[in-house]
Amino acid sequence: MPVKAISKQQALDTKRPVLYITERCVFILTDQGLKLTEVAPGIDIEKDILAHMEFEPIVADNVKAMDTRLFSKTAMGLANDILYNFQKIPRKKGKPMTLNNKNTLSNQIINKALDFGACLAGIANIAELKKSPSHLISEKMEEFLGVGTKQVKGKKQGEVHWPDNANSAIVIAVEHPLGAPDMDWWIKGLKGGTKGNAKLISVFSKLADWLETEKKIPYVKLAYHIEHGGVFMKDAAVLGGLGCIGKNNLLVTPQFGSRIRLRVMLLDKDLSSTGILDFDPCNNCKEYCRQKCPQKAFDEKVYFPEEYKLGELPGRTGKYSRIKCNIQMKKNTENGKDVDFEIAGSDKKGLEIRYCRICELVCPVGKSS
Ligand code: SF4
Ligand code: SF4
């Protein structure tokens, strides 16, 4: 097993927690020395630990019992714990993007993204993103391996590998309003594919320029494939405080429902996540999104948490068939039509495809705003 050395002083200086875990007890490193914080079930602190030590550690006032699962021969089910913690990240009441003063850089970045034309923006910390449902499940689902994944040398297929210097993700959203359906029409040959995506690219470029020139913060190049360094955008948006994952398997924002499109930029700055919102409109909804799907993509439970040893699944309740939705996408592509469009003065013909957005458009959230 490879060994990694750690400097005690450096850990203390940088306030990194250091634990010493043995089969009898757990110590934590403090400025005053080692402090005993947990003991294994049935262990006597005096007789079984202190009597065998060459120095006297500090003993915490409230020494806790070590997790009994550590001593069991069966799997501990840590994924559930991790996910539980993800779900337990404190929710922020009220509107997103109201940050406390400690996060002035985050505030500046979000405000700039809004100035440049984003309708929402937030920040997700990469360490927290690694505990999100999509990340935890990504290596376990065969279905996932077929979607947007590529073999990377030295990695299992589908294994997520964000760049080492990626510490936080800026998530920006642009609205695709009901009154401007053409923002979502895919036109082959148009930069970005859709008008909405072209707008996202423009906001993204301005923000990247501002970060580099004004703030001297280079952004980390984001790959398309997840395992090459791409990100789970919806999970990042949840952590960034933009909304929640709805029963339509999409991000639902309080202001615009699911009628938004996302883009993400990675930074090497270690910024805190700006979410999660205390917001869930699906609990008391009649599930219009699921009822109206022409392919009945939400009619069956496709994924079972027990199968993946997770407490929560992407798609919210495991009721979403990507395969059925893809059938609809294929139909939409077949029905695409030739259109004229202008690119830098040219009059090329392009293929316009209007993909299904029913589960997004029928959602009532944000329509009164
Ligand atoms: S239609 Fe209802 S259930 Fe579906 S995403 Fe919107 S709020 Fe949630
Ligand atoms: S995009 Fe259309 S086909 Fe796909 S899940 Fe939504 S409603 Fe169903």
Image: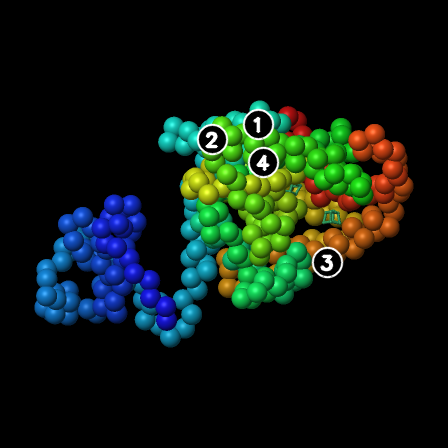
Q: Quadrant of the C terminus?
A: top right
- In percent of width and height, residue 136 lies at 51, 58
Q: Which residue is mark 2?
A: 215
Whether residue 65 can be seen here: no
Q: Amino acid at mark 2?
A: Lys
Classify mark 2: residues with Cα within 10 Å, few (<14), some (14-19) or many (20+).
few
Residue 27 visible in the current orientation: yes
The alpha-carbon separation of the residues under discs 3 and 2 comes to: 44 Å
Using the image, determine if residue 339 lies above or below residue 82.
Answer: above
Instruction: Report the Cα–Cα distance between label 1 and label 2.
Output: 17 Å
Number of dots carrying numbers: 4
Mark pair 3, 4: CA separation = 28 Å
* Residue denoted by label 1: 114
Q: CA distance from mark 1 to mark 3?
A: 35 Å
> In the rendered image, which residue does mark 3 sit on?
323
Q: Tag 3: residue type? A: Ile
Give the foreground label among 3 and 2. Answer: 2
Query: Which of pointers 3 and 4 indicates the residue nearer the eye?
Result: 4
Q: Secondary structure at mark 4?
A: strand
The amino acid type of the residue labelled 4 equals Ile
- As drawn, the residue found furthest toward the bottom would be 73
Report the residue marked by disc 4: 172
Q: Nearer the viewer, mark 1 or mark 3?
A: 1
Task: Please tell me how crowded label 4 is: few (under 14), some (14-19), or many (20+) other residues with Cα within 10 Å.
Answer: many
N-terminal-most mark, 1 or 3: 1
Q: Please tell me whether residue 89 is drawn above or below residue 99 in the rendered image.
A: below
Please tell me which residue lies in front, 102 or 161: 161
State the separation of the CA atoms marked 1 and 4. Answer: 8 Å
Q: Are marks 1 and 3 in contact (CB under 8 Å)?
A: no
For label 3, the SS is: helix
Q: Amino acid at mark 1?
A: Leu
